[in-house]
Image (spheres, helix red, strand yellow):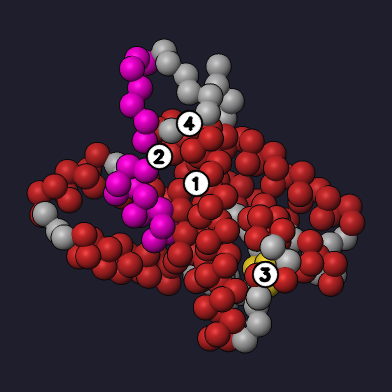
Amino acid sequence: MARSPTIEVLVVCTVVFVVQSILGLFSSPIATGLFALTGPVAVNPLSIVTSVYAHAGLGHYVANMVALLVFGLLVERRTTRARFHVFFLSVGMLAGIAEVTIGGLLRGPVAVLGASGAIFGLLGYLLAGNTVSRTVFRSIELSGRAQLALFAVVALGVTIATGQPGVALIAHFTGLLLGLVAGRVGLLDVRRSGHSTAYDG
């Protein structure tokens, strides 16, 4: 039986959360260097990765892990372990970089951590990569640019609707937009030759 990449991500996030808890690294300056991504990103490139799996506290961790299970378990059924992990980490890193870069220009220096950008990518993949969405896109025949503009509007709407104070809105928007585009082109989908075939990445 194939291992679940969603559960693997959950385990990694949990281990990082436990380490943060034991060391008391939620609000200390050390936490910023180890887990929180700040600009310029070249100063601490490791945090581009660690920030995806770290969280700011128990509520942040629980909310993200519930969303991860809801969306991740659905996406992983369509792809391999390797593709899932590469997609999750790549979208999470790009979302974090967008937050500290664009957010830094708009609001001054910011720090970001958490899996929500990557999770919004999973949500976007589900929204644009399902059979209903593909049927609709085939019937209305939008150009590539029009589809991208539509995805940007959808991503902006969802981001605003789910936004709260202190939330990394630019990261959420970026993750969702990347997920919508990836879902539209079926980036993660693999053809399965039979129902009993298991892909283990």
Left/right of residue 45 with respect to residue 82 in the rendered view: right
Callout 1 amino acid: Phe
The answer to which quarter of the image holds residue 93 is: bottom right
According to the image, label 2 marks what residue? 188
Residue 130 vertical position relative to residue 115 in the rendered view, above or below: above
170 relative position to 31: left or right: left
Which sits earlier in the primary sequence, circle 4 or circle 3?
3
Graded by Cα atoms within 10 Å as few (under 14), some (14 to 19) or many (20 or more), the crowding at tag 2 reads some
Q: Could you classify mark 1 by the number of other residues whose Cα lies within 10 Å: few (under 14), some (14-19), or many (20 or more)?
A: many
Element type at mark 1: helix
Q: Amino acid at mark 4?
A: Thr
Question: Residue 168, percent across and down?
Answer: 56, 70
| Percent x, y of residue 162 | 47, 66
Q: Secondary structure at mark 4?
A: loop
Q: CA distance from mark 4 to mark 2?
A: 8 Å
100, above or below 72, in the image: below
| Residue labelled with disc 1 | 87
How far apart are the alpha carbons under marks 1 and 3? 22 Å
Work out whether mark 1 precedes mark 4 in sequence or the reverse, and give the earlier one: 4
Is the residue under label 3 in contact with that under label 4 (CB below 8 Å)? no
| Identity of the residue drawn at 40% across and 53% down | 179
Q: Which residue is mark 3?
A: 42
Marks 1 and 4, how far apart at CA: 11 Å
Which circle, 2 or 3, is nearer the viewer?
3
Please state the horizontal and vertical placement of residue 124, each as a whole percent of the image: 39, 53
Mark 4 neighbour class, 10 Å CA radius: few under 14, some 14 to 19, many 20 or more: many
| x, y percent for residue 90 | 53, 52
Q: Mark 4 against mark 3, which lies toward the viewer?
A: 3
Q: Are marks 1 and 2 in contact (CB under 8 Å)?
A: yes
The residue that disc 4 covers is: 80
Identify the magenta region.
176-195
Whether 91 is drawn above or below 69: the answer is below
